[in-house]
Image: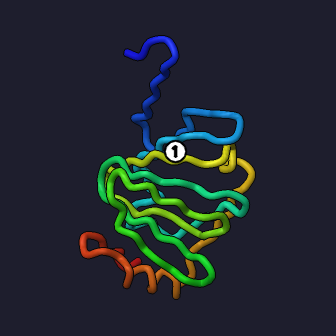
Amino acid sequence: MPGPGLLSFEWKGEGYQPLVFSQDWQVALLNWEAVIDAENIGEIERHNQTDEVFVLQSGRAVLFTICDDEMQAVDMQAGVLYNVTAASWHNLIATRDASWVIVEKRDTHLYDCEYRRLTADELNKLKGLLPDWLELKPK
């Protein structure tokens, strides 16, 4: 149990939960949720003014980005910091046991997020970039 000068936080629920706040940044935990399941993938987001850092804690996950019309998909490794730069479209595909630490500008998810659907061409390209352990099922 933490003592004076130390706080601890955990999030066991599904989805995204900001937990630690400073004046300029926040740290959140993200646990698997249906929107990042391989069968539901299709929406991507971007933060136009700020970067966002992802650290995979458990499970398996792919972080994919689109920046300057270039798409990449990274088979995330636990404990590695992945920095998605400002204005890069991105999302995750993951197993049900996946969990991440996310560090970003405070409240950016409230005012600096833009969302859209992947185009059919983007979805087809993404399918070709996925690691062997993960396949998108046809809809």
Q: Residue drawn 52% across and 71% down?
A: 65
Q: For residue 81, which quarter of the picture?
A: bottom left
Asked if residue 101 is positioned above or below residue 80 in the image, the reply reads: above
Q: Residue 135, image x and y in percent? A: 31, 74
Q: Nearer the viewer, residue 33 or 8?
A: 8
Q: Nearer the viewer, residue 45 or 101?
A: 101
Q: Residue furthest left?
A: 133
Q: Quadrant of the C terminus?
A: bottom left
Q: Nearer the viewer, residue 13 or 46?
A: 46
Asked if residue 19 is positioned above or below residue 125 in the image, the reply reads: above
Q: For residue 45, which quarter of the picture?
A: bottom right
Q: Is residue 29 left or right of residue 68?
A: left
Q: Quadrant of the N terminus?
A: top left
Q: Residue drawn 40% across and 35% down?
A: 12
Q: Residue 3, image x and y in percent? A: 44, 12
Q: Residue 88, image x and y in percent? A: 61, 69
Question: How many badges with numbers are in the image?
Answer: 1
Asked if residue 118 is positioned above or below residue 12 in the image, the reply reads: below
Q: Residue furthest front?
A: 5
Q: Residues within 10 Å of mark 1 (few under 14, many from 20)?
A: some
Residue on which disc 1 sits: 16
The amino acid type of the residue labelled 1 equals Tyr
Q: Residue drawn 66% across and 47% down?
A: 105
Q: Is residue 50 left or right of residue 12?
A: right
> Is label 1 in a helix, a strand or a loop?
strand
